[in-house]
Image (cartoon, grey):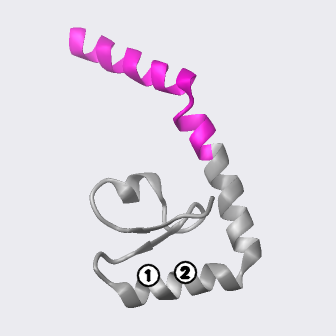
Amino acid sequence: KPVIASAVGGIPEVIDGDSSGMLVPAADSHALGNAIVELLRNREIMLQMAEINKTIVSNKFSSDAMMAQYAGLYRKLLS
């Protein structure tokens, strides 16, 4: 799915603001509205973002990827 999010906290680490989603300033309802309208007017961009996000989620957040990340963290903590 395409994503529109506020650029706060760790969100910009997950959503790059270019290909995987749109980032808007926090508490800026005008910017949020503009982003929504932009995506609704451009179905091709919505579909591209959806495909990119599907790949990101399967690569970074699959059970195998998460196990590898946790194993790396445990090794780091134990060393």
Residue 4 in the image: x percent, y percent? 49, 69
Mark 1 in CB contact with mark 2 (< 8 angstroms) = yes
Q: Quadrant of the C terminus?
A: top left
Based on the picture, tell me whether residue 39 belongs to the magenta stretch: no
Disc 1 target residue: 32
Secondary structure under tag 1 reads: helix
**Residue at point 32% right, 53% down?**
10
Instruction: Report the magenta residues as a range.
Output: 56-79
Disc 2 target residue: 36
Three-letter amino acid code at disc 1?
Answer: Leu
Secondary structure under tag 2 reads: helix
**Residue at point 57% right, 30% down?**
62
Mark number for residue 49? none
Residue 52 in the image: x percent, y percent? 66, 54
Residue 8 in the image: x percent, y percent? 29, 64
Three-letter amino acid code at disc 2?
Answer: Ile
Considering depth in this image, is 78 or 70 the residue closer to the camera?
70
